[in-house]
């Protein structure tokens, strides 16, 4: 059934000769100007969404047979970095929806993928993976409902994925591994109610509204295993796993925020003077030292992110999934990078004299970097959980030699 779709549709809506990150660079003026409009203060501009659709950005990680690009996670991170450096909220929503759409493409049943990807226009999916909904089994499926938070980009989504804990006799159904059974349900956006309560200090324009899934029947083939252990079709993203894709997107966003902050600070410092000073801020020893130290941290974090992702991508190209050591290394670098980028944004904001006045990209980036560093995948617990594998690696014979 899906073969007919491949024949009727071009390989991708974004199958241009230039890379996706280069295309994003061409859209910087549009992204920035649309983000500054008051009507877009809590969501991605419809004009930007249309441009991203045309460029194929939402389907980088989706299989080619569905019209996606099946790209490497390092390339996905580069796209997120480029977009976030133009506007952090836009980059965040794009990264979140790129992963959510990938999950739908890789884990949806054949019939459901036909419903979602078999239309004239490829779908954009929003998702909340926290299992705050409940469902009971029914003949042929489930009956469930729930209220969810952080539906990034949901205002322009075509489909919405929600997680539900399966219940029996009023208690969660437990699996052999001791975890409750969680099913993901991907439903048309008009099947959920957006609650419109997104009033936050940072990442304001992500439109990460709370939403409600009213109680309704859900056919079994509209659901998938929320633990992402059963991909239905082959792709690089299916091989590396959902967590790797999430880390790639979030790391790219953090790097984009820090990159823009360094640029804005350097530019402002080159034209501003402190009171009674004869030289610009950029000529002062304090600024020079602080800038090069933070710039070095940014470059180190960025290099490490792409080094780890590229290694995982190379294995995936050979059909090899990342091992536990690979995952723990990625968790380490993802968390560390967010901390570095938050510190870079804080330095950039405090380094020039008028960054408190609105509109201020430096002030916005400081808040957005702080919010990004609070995400569940970058808590200090990720470092703690990764520590055993990393310490064991350093304790191995020969670890003290660069020639091992």
Image (spheres, rainbow, N blue to C red):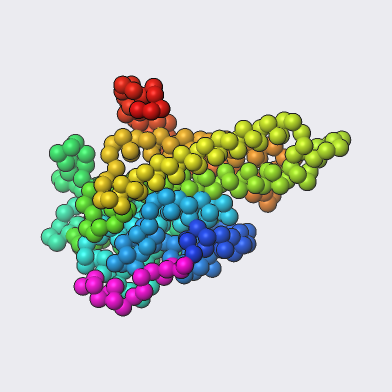
Q: Is residue 126 above or below residue 67?
A: above
Q: Image check: 7 left or right of 306?
A: left
**Which residue is pictured at 39% across the width and 46% down the height?**
310
The answer to whether residue 125 is seen in the rendering is no
* Residue 75 appears anywhere in the view: yes
Q: Is residue 280 magenta?
A: no
Q: Quadrant of the C terminus?
A: top left
Whole-percent x, y for residue 309 in the image:
39, 45
247 vs 91, left or right, is left
**Residue farthest to the left?**
139
Q: Quadrant of the N terminus?
A: bottom left
Quarter of the image for residue 389 reads top left
Going by the image, does 3 lie left or right of 75?
Answer: left
Who's the residue at 69% across and 37% down the image? 351
Say which residue appears at 54% left-offset and 68% top-offset.
47
Residue 92 at what x, y percent from top left? 48, 52
Question: Whole-percent x and y of residue 13?
Answer: 41, 70
Query: Bounds of the magenta span?
Result: 1-17
42 and 307: which one is in front? Answer: 307
Number of numbered markers: 0
Q: Does the magenta run of residues contain 3?
A: yes
């Amino acid at each position: 059934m899906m073969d007919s779709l491949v024949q009727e549709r071009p390989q991708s809506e974004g199958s241009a000769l230039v890379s996706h990150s280069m295309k994003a660079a061409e859209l910087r003026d549009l992204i920035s100007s649309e983000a500054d409009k008051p009507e877009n203060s809590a969501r991605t501009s419809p004009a930007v969404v249309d441009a991203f659709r045309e460029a194929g950005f939402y389907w980088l990680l989706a299989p080619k047979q569905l019209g996606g690009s099946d790209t490497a996670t390092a390339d996905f991170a580069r796209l997120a970095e480029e977009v976030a450096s133009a506007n952090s909220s836009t980059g965040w929503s794009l990264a979140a929806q790129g992963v959510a759409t990938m999950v739908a493409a890789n884990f949806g049943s054949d019939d459901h993928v036909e419903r979602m990807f078999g239309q004239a226009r490829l779908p954009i999916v929003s998702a909340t993976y926290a299992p705050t909904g409940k469902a009971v089994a029914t003949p042929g499926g489930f009956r469930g409902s729930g209220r969810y938070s952080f539906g990034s980009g949901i205002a322009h989504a075509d489909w919405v994925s929600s997680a539900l804990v399966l219940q029996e006799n009023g208690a969660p159904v437990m699996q052999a591994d001791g975890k409750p059974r969680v099913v993901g349900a991907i439903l048309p956006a008009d099947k959920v109610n957006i609650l419109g309560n997104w009033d936050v200090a940072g990442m304001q324009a992500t439109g990460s509204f709370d939403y409600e899934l009213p109680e309704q029947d859900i056919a079994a083939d509209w659901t998938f295993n929320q633990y992402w252990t059963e991909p239905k079709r082959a792709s690089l993203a299916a091989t590396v796993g959902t967590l790797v894709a999430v880390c790639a997107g979030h790391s790219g966003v953090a790097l984009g925020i820090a990159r823009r902050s360094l640029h804005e600070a350097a530019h402002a410092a080159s034209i501003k003077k402190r009171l009674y000073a004869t030289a610009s801020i950029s000529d002062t020893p304090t600024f020079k030292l602080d800038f090069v130290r933070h710039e070095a941290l940014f470059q180190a974090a960025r290099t490490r992110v792409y080094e780890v992702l590229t290694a995982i991508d190379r294995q995936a190209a050979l059909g090899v999934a990342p091992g536990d050591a690979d995952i723990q290394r990625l968790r380490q670098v993802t968390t560390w990078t967010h901390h570095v980028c938050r510190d870079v944004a804080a330095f950039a904001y405090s380094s020039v004299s008028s960054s408190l006045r609105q509109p201020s990209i430096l002030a916005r980036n400081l808040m957005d970097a702080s919010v990004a560093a609070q995400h569940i995948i970058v808590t200090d617990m990720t470092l703690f959980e990764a520590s055993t594998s990393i310490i064991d690696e350093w304790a191995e014979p020969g670890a003290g030699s660069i020639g091992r």
